[in-house]
Amino acid sequence: MLVGDAGCHKDPHTVQGMGDAARSARMLVEELATVDPATSALDQALARYAARRDDDLRPMYDFTTFRLRQQVPDEVWERFEARTREDPALAALRVAAMVHAIHPRVVYSVERITEFAAGAPVNPTAQPTQNERL
């Protein structure tokens, strides 16, 4: 089973590897703890782990590989970046997402970037919507 950078390689400039590994390992342990050795439920536990890991890692993967940037029109991305420079609350929210203090999808999804670029309020306690999940 792969955790951290072994399960999802990203550009190292975001310094995500160690945190990714720790969160991935924790998720793997949580899923394995649900397995009764007398059953063949291991495959299901590993599938749940993989889905959780992908949901956790995908937003930052898309951000660091520019996949997210390619899905957003240039003018929207530029407004999002400008607002980040002008709005300390949005800048703080982006930092919180980078260090996984909040789920990264709260900031790093096409929907949220578009909303922030349009002036949507910044909610530091927001959670990703179901549509923003994988």
Image (cartoon, grey):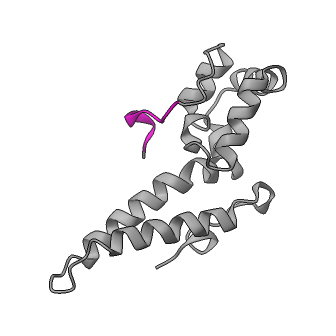
53 vs 76: above or below: below
13 with respect to 130 (left or right): right
Q: Position of residue 19 (x, y in %)?
A: 64, 63
Residue 1 appears at what percent x and percent y? 46, 79
- Front residue of 8/24: it is 24
The x and y percentages for residue 63 are 67, 46
Q: Which residue occupies 51% across, 72% down?
A: 25
Is residue 12 placed above or below 74 in the rendered structure? below
- The image quadrant that residue 82 belongs to is top right
Residue depicted at 30% across the width and 70% down the height: 45
Which stretch appears magenta?
A: 126-133
Q: Is residue 45 above or below residue 116?
A: below
Query: Which residue sits at x=74%, y=33%?
Result: 92
Q: Is residue 90 visible?
A: yes
Q: Residue furthest left?
A: 39
- Residue 97 falls in image quadrant: top right
Whether residue 132 is in magenta: the answer is yes
Q: Residue furthest top?
A: 119
Magenta-colored segment: predominant secondary structure: loop
| Residue 8 seen from this side | no
Whole-percent x, y for residue 33 in the image: 32, 74
Residue 61 lies left or right of residue 11; in this view the side is: left
State whether residue 68 is above or below residue 27: above
Nearer the observer, 109 or 99: 99
- Tell which residue pokes out farthest to the bottom in this image: 38
